Amino acid sequence: MIDPNSFMVFSGTASRYLAEKICLSLGCPLGQLQITHFSDGEFAVSYEQSIRGRDIFLVQSTFPNSDNLMELLLMIDAAKRASARTINAVIPYFGWARQDRKDKPRVSIGAKLVADLLSAAGVHRVITMDLHADQIQGFFDVPVDHLYASGVILPYLQKLNLEDLVIASPDVGGSKRANTYAKFLGCPLVLCNKTRARANVVDTMQIIGDVKGKNVVIVDDMVDTAGTITKAADLMKASGAKSVRACASHCVMSGPASERVQNSALEEIVFTDSIPYHDGCAKVVQLTVADMFADTIKRVLENKSISDQYIV
């Protein structure tokens, strides 16, 4: 049994909605944290109760804008200076993860920089979900518990009972993830081969595989401007697909994404609630990962393995 007095859960501004659900699942109150904003845009973090000797879990996704990352860094630093026993950053969506390598000369590796910032601030453990690239775990010198959204998305897909199901990847880079879904569901895999004109702009796309008369589910890790996934959906529908759905872990949905999804051939697009969504597109479905993160927090506190909670 976990001693309820041994740990505390706190939240940054942007992820409070998820932290409240995690606390409900854990049966504990959300810790009292105050973030004071100054007129010049600067802000300060203070814990409103003692955290000395406690295991602290800080829930904050680092999606844009950068204030969310800065809040998390200040929360970690304040917890370190307040003598918390361990500081665990719960980051459902780890931003800057697309900058995981030098893909052209003279560019930064943002994911490594963020990992270094978190370590320098004083974090002891990171709990995150569906990193854009698995190797980002190696950027940290502290333990990283890497969860998978498949734990909530696959049961949802199974409940749809779709016949003639085909899993598709919107690009070659996501083929490993899509292949894992296809193997679990026992259905064929289709790939899309795309070329980009520039970042966030798809130039050309071709389907590798047969989608005629099939119910297609496109699998990805995140949807940003929705250009790739809607183009893939429209192309598959034009190629004879019976229906096209999509699922992705992280609902970035920036810029024209909601309008694109609404006007596309997609019947629905399924996300987790790692990032809040407020744009009101009727085709967006969000599944909560609160219970999954709460279970992981319990296992960390009880020094139990988390690997047996994975579906795939």
Image (cartoon, rainbow, N blue to C red):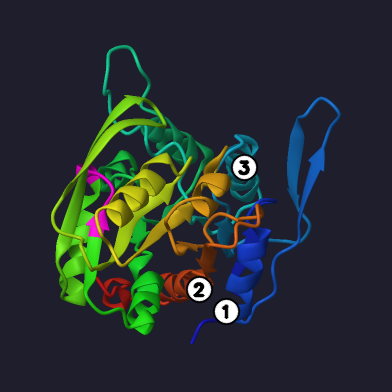
Q: Is mark 2 on a helix, strand or loop?
A: helix
240 over 227 or under it: above or below: below
> Residue 31 or 163: which is nearer the viewer?
163
The residue that disc 2 covers is 294
Q: What type is the residue that disc 3 sits on? A: Asn
In the rendered image, residue 39, in percent from the top left (x then y), is placed at 86, 29
Residue furthest out toward the right: 39
User: Of the residues tagged 1 and 3, which is closer to the observer?
Assistant: 3
Residue 26 marker: 1
Q: How far apart are labels 2 and 3 at the CA level?
A: 21 Å
Q: Position of 5 compared to 184: left or right?
A: right
Q: Which residue is drawn at the image coordinates 24% and 63% (left, top)?
A: 167
- Under mark 2, the amino acid is Ala
Give the residue displayed 58% in from the left and 52% down from the top.
60
Q: Where is residue 90 in the image (x, y as percent from the top left)?
A: 50, 57
Contact flag, marks 1 and 2 (Cβ < 8 Å): yes
Using a 10 Å C-alpha cutoff, classify the residue at mark 3 as few (fewer than 14 neighbours), some (14 to 19) or many (20 or more): some
**The quarter of the displayed image where residue 106 is located:** top left
Three-letter amino acid code at disc 1? Leu
In this rendered view, identify the residue nearer to me: 157 or 64. Answer: 157
In this figure, which residue is indicated by the disc labeled 3? 68
Q: How far apart are marks 1 and 2 (CA)?
A: 6 Å
Q: In this view, does 249 lie to the left or right of 102?
A: right
Q: Earlier in the sequence, mark 1 or mark 3?
A: 1
119 shown above or below 30: above
Q: Give the range drawn in magenta.
A: 168-173
Camera sees residue 4: no
